[in-house]
């Protein structure tokens, strides 16, 4: 089972890319942080990210979703991972909770995720939502922190540059194929521009 991660700055189009890959028949796992925020806001909690247990809640959902994902094919695609939660903790200036440390140790020891991660680059803007209340400038800082966290844990980042969604989907899907002479150079995906 090859489990690929999509990561990057908020508003970069990861969820649209994930849905495009699902449309191609790949099993996908949605982002946990957005679900944790949506569930809390549905209960009337406007800013759940200020709660002390916020990071623990994300880690718990990420782990539960990863363990529950049916291993029915050779590939799964994840919108974010516990490494993203590490970046979120750093961005928020919070200590790394023991639950996150334990989960990163587990995914490392068990080789859960592919070491090549798809880093979805920003689109030049960041539209606010109820779960995403940061400016474009703040999102760029968040993007930088994500890069640092993934590199610190030994992951290789494959850039997914801004482009039409169909081009991004095709480039990522192609890069998931078995290694061979037609694979893109490490660190950069090639795609036709519209």
Image (cartoon, grey):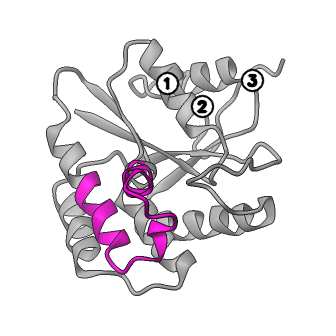
Discs 3, 1 touching: Cβ within 8 Å: no
Where, quadrant-wise, is the C terminus in this rendering? top right
Residue 154 picture location, percent across and down: 42, 64
> Which residue in the protein does label 2 denote?
184
Crowding at mark 2 (Cα within 10 Å: few <14, some 14-19, many 20+):
some
Q: Say which of marks 3 and 2 sits in front.
A: 3
Residue 107 picture location, percent across and down: 23, 58
* Quadrant of residue 16 within the rendered picture: top right
Q: Is 103 situated left or right of 55 in this image?
A: left
Q: Is residue 130 visible?
A: yes
SS at mark 2?
Answer: loop
> Which residue in the protein does label 3 denote?
164
Discs 2, 1 touching: Cβ within 8 Å: no
The earlier-in-sequence mark between 3 and 2 is 3
Discs 3, 2 touching: Cβ within 8 Å: no
Q: Which residue is depicted at the point 63% across and 37% down?
A: 13
SS at mark 1?
Answer: helix
Q: Is 166 situated left or right of 38 in this image?
A: right
Q: How many angstroms separate mark 3 from mark 1 (CA)?
A: 14 Å
Residue range corresponding to the magenta coloring: 35-62
Q: Which labelled disc corresponds to residue 19? A: 1
Q: Say which of marks 2 and 1 sits in front.
A: 1
Residue 14 picture location, percent across and down: 57, 39
Crowding at mark 3 (Cα within 10 Å: few <14, some 14-19, many 20+):
few
């Amino acid at each position: 089972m090859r489990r690929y991660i999509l990561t990057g700055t908020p508003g970069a189009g990861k969820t649209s890319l994930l849905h495009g890959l699902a449309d191609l028949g790949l099993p996908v796992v949605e982002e946990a942080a957005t679900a944790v925020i949506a569930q809390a806001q549905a209960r009337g909690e406007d800013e759940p990210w200020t709660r002390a247990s916020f990071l623990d809640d994300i880690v718990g959902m990420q782990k539960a979703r990863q363990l529950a994902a049916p291993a029915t094919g050779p590939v799964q695609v994840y919108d974010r991972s516990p490494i993203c939660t590490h970046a979120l903790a750093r961005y928020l200036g919070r200590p790394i909770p023991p639950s996150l440390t334990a989960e990163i140790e587990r995914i490392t020891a068990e080789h859960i995720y592919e070491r090549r991660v798809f880093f979805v680059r920003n689109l030049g803007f960041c539209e606010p939502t109820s779960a995403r209340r940061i400016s474009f400038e703040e999102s760029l800082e968040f993007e930088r922190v994500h890069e640092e966290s993934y590199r610190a844990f030994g992951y290789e980042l494959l850039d997914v540059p801004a482009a039409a969604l169909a081009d991004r989907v095709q480039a990522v899907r192609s890069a998931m194929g078995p290694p061979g002479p037609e694979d893109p150079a490490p660190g950069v995906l090639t795609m036709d521009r519209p």
